[in-house]
Amino acid sequence: MTLGRTRAVGLHGLAGFVVEVEVDVSAGLPQFLVSGRPDASCKQSPDRVKAAAANCGHQVAQRRVTVNLSPASVPKIGSGFDLAICVAVLAASETIERRVVEDVVHLGELGLDGTVRPLRGVLPLVLAAARAGVRHVVVPVANAAEARLIPGIRVHPVAHLGELVERYRLLAAGVTPPEVEEPVHPVPPEVGWPDLVDIVGQDEPRRALETAAAGGHHLYLVGPPGAGKTMLAERLPGLLPPLDDEQAMEVTAVSSILGMPGVLTALERRPPLVAPHHGASMPAIVGGGTNPVVPGAVTQAHHGVLFLDEAPEFQSGVLQALRQPVESGVVVIGRAMGRFLFPCRFQLVLAANPCPCGLGYGKGDRCRCSSLRRNTYQNKLRGPLLDRVDIQVFVPAPSRATLILEPGETTAVVAARVREARAIQGERWGHLGYRVNAHVPGPVFRDGPMRLCRAVTHDLDAALDRGLSMRSYHRCLKLAWTLADLRGADVPDGDDVGMAVGLRCQDGELAA
Ligand SMILES: [Zn+2]
């Protein structure tokens, strides 16, 4: 028999899938073919495998080698299959004993001299292997710390192909091979979020920020330059609870795919803050590319905050494309080789100047632009995108009176209230699979057990007659519940509904 078998893991979007690697080596015209939908980089694997094996003293060049990667229905992207293909080839040619490698997953790119190079995406790859019941995984030594973040699977680091062959020779002979020395990773210094105490005054925007954090609501900040919109946005992740195990795994998987290979050593426990430049392209924001299809800013902000400063400056197409991810928490990218789903359950924070000239137009301000110009600017956000943003608040420029104000509450104090409010929501919505009010479908708040009494919603109901959209109506109800949760009240009262209307509508939608 000249068949060798081992396993690898491929990546589709953010999810891994175990790949069976089969190799047949026979006499005949020398050739080395890979089948099972390899991409261009994977197709070049034979060149690297032949050179690496030869430089470790194992000739495979003069044989007929056929490699099959299954399932053949899913494309195999990248050079991470090199090590598995090489091990299967060496097993087929009986350099390595077949039974010791059959159930092991091998991950790694091969250098021509046999060096095993680190890969991107090792965290989701090893996670997929562990979930498929694999018990042993061989990874490049630089990826070992990252692979060990996954419980329930033995990680065997390898630096060089020759060393791996020797290891299998010892195992076949019943000897325990020595452990490979791993590089020591320096512990990165703990970087805290900027504190809310730095923001003086701004009671209304502070309350908006706290409410957004408590209920998972999207937030729109309008105000003149220098009013502190960016400072506010940067303090939102610090108010959110730390990520739980599952969330941390998802967030870290994104860093693993996008970051430098071999530098990840710990799970990310902090909600991410992603602030793309307004010149960013569509693929940079929503994800794209072909080989591989990579997640964009919306997915990097998964379980955290996506902050679009100077939001009206973004391309209209980009702003339009955000509607679906904002609503569904998932972005779908269609490609010839299939559909790619990336999670993106982020909190959106939009910031804008009142006018494109960057000057305020209130009393004493210097803006001389026409109201048409200002409206055109603001209208880029209005409509479907802004309609999905629960809280809209004006951030005024600081005045001389600000200087004598006492410092406000710290992030720790506000975050504690947010935590309590989120615990209440977790209990209320857990059975429906939601964590926060903002994610619950609107009609749930209008009918059934969540229905508030007429007296409480009287003013809001009346606004429906004045042209308030049903979506806005639902969003006010959600906000009212979040405000009640922050107070620790069982149900919202008239004040909560009134305040919700105030947070929701800064531009006079309800004021008439
Ligand atoms: Zn202006």
Image (tube, rainbow, N blue to C red):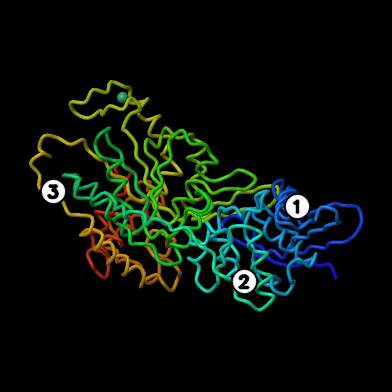
Q: Quadrant of the C terminus?
A: top left
Q: Is residue 440 left or right of residue 164?
A: left
> Where in the figure is residue 247, as x and y percent of width and height?
44, 63
User: Mark on residue 18?
Assistant: none
The kind of secondary structure element at disc 3 is loop
Q: Nearer the viewer, mark 3 or mark 1?
A: 1
The residue that mark 2 highlights is 132
> Where in the figure is residue 91, as x and y percent of width and height?
76, 66
Ligand 1 shown in quarter: top left
The residue that mark 3 highlights is 407
Residue 194 visible to the viewer: yes
First in residue order: circle 3 vs circle 1 = 1
The kind of secondary structure element at disc 2 is loop
Report crowding for label 1: few under 14, some 14 to 19, many 20 or more residues within 10 A (C-alpha).
many
Where 230 sits versus 339, above or below? above
Q: Amino acid at mark 2?
A: Ala
Report crowding for label 2: few under 14, some 14 to 19, many 20 or more residues within 10 A (C-alpha).
few
Q: Quadrant of residue 479?
A: bottom left
Structural distance between the alpha carbons of marks 3 and 2 = 53 Å
The residue that mark 1 highlights is 50
Cβ(mark 3) to ligand 1 < 8 Å? no
Residue sitting farthest toward the top? 368
